[in-house]
Image (cartoon, helix red, strand yellow):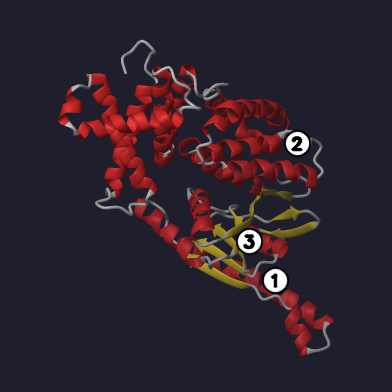
Amino acid sequence: MERVLLSFIGTGNYQPCIYVWGDHRCKTPYFQEAAVRFFNPDQCLVLMTEMAQKKHGAALRRRIKRIVYQRSKKARAACNSKNALRKRIKRIVYRPVSIPDGRNEDELWAIFSALTDCIPEGATLIVDVTHGFRTQPMLALAALCYLRVARNVQIERIIYGAFEARHPDTSEAPVFDLTPFLTLIDWSVAAHQFIHYGQANDLARLIREIHRLTYVEQAQVQAQHAATAASWLEGFARALGLVRLAEVMTEHALRLPEALERMRQDVDQIARLRPFGLLLDITAERARSLHHPDPLSLDGLRLQAELIRHLLNYGLVQQAVTVAREAIVTRYALDLGRDPLQEREAVEHELGRLASGLQDPAVRAGYTPETHQLAELWNRLTNVRNDINHAGMRTNPETTNNLYRLASECAEAAANWIARDAHQPE
């Protein structure tokens, strides 16, 4: 996998200083030279405008070539054969990449295109933002985050040579590693997936990885509860996706908030977990709002109505239809004074009989408005459920858009019906 140093250079009057990275030092006005010496990439790509090329292009090229020459000279002195020499010499491809000034949106997109076109598929990047001008570093970071997905690009490091933080006596300037802050973007994506779609895999993975790193890196404070909370978070999302209704309401909706509260101690003490601190309360409250010890009670059904709406908001329409249909059976059983678990099959048969009665004018004429409404709802919900579960392998299946609309409408209507007060007519 090719390692690529990606950098920018502007038109500033860069002054020499001694950049310091660990035990390595490099005196230069151009941080790109120091980065090549420190990280030894296969390629050095420097994005520059026409003015930057005229002012610094030739000087920077000479400095990068000098690194290759110095290494070649050192390798020749240490090798006795040409084959051994070829293995020891590290060739560094230096390539200036021309970009516009970025004075308007079209030019910013042109910079994006230049950046994405020059990066090889699957490359590992060291990103230098030291001499970036105006919006260049931000644009580069946004583009590279996209390339991580689109082209399987890996970001090894994001570095900044802090010239302004140099020591006044020694002129030594630290090199800041900004890579940990890249995970903020991962956090934002994972949080978006969880909040808007109920998907917790990426969020749980981030939490587990930070928990693990506190032990691998022998941190002063090691996580105690984060991994457990991640497991409950992932389990809650999976239970929603698999429509484990009783499990969600009686177990996950209780245990997840407890696990998150214990995790708060880790969040307060471990800096890398702080992004999740913003989600602790909202996640705990969202889960807690679904807790009820008896899903088959009237109060439990009101929470099931909220669960149906949660699923619809997540875009989990199939799951919402499944919960809605089962909740109607439960509510109708309670209305009839029957056991919603032991007599479930008989109650479902009765609902089917009501729906079939819609086809007989004489039977239909005897329905009250409330019974007619229930029969219509059950009939529509059953048809939608069957169309989904049979993958459209039936005569005259609904189109995707119609099915999505019908399923959402039926699930919402079912939520309203099951959550009505006990004294309301059915």
Are dots 1 and 2 in contact, CB under 8 Å?
A: no
**The one of 213 and 167 positioned closer to us in this rendering:** 213
Please tell me in which quadrant of the rendered image residue 424 appears.
top left
Disc 3 is placed on an element classified as helix
How many other residues sit within 10 Å of disc 1, few (<14), some (14-19) or many (≥20)?
some
How many other residues sit within 10 Å of disc 2, few (<14), some (14-19) or many (≥20)?
many
Q: Which residue is mark 2?
A: 223
Gap in angstroms between the C-alphas marked 1 and 2: 44 Å
Look at the picture and state if 64 lies above or below 299.
Answer: below
Give the side of residue 305 with respect to residue 170, left or right: left
At x 38%, y 13%, the residue is 421
Look at the picture and state if 292 lies above or below 353.
Answer: above
Q: Amino acid at mark 3?
A: Gln
At x 64%, y 35%, the residue is 232
Q: Amino acid at mark 2?
A: Ala
Please tell me in which quadrant of the rendered image residue 369 appears.
top left
Specify which label sits upstream in the sequence, 1 or 3: 3
Identify the residue at the far top of this view: 423
Disc 1 is placed on an element classified as helix
Q: Which residue is mark 3?
A: 32
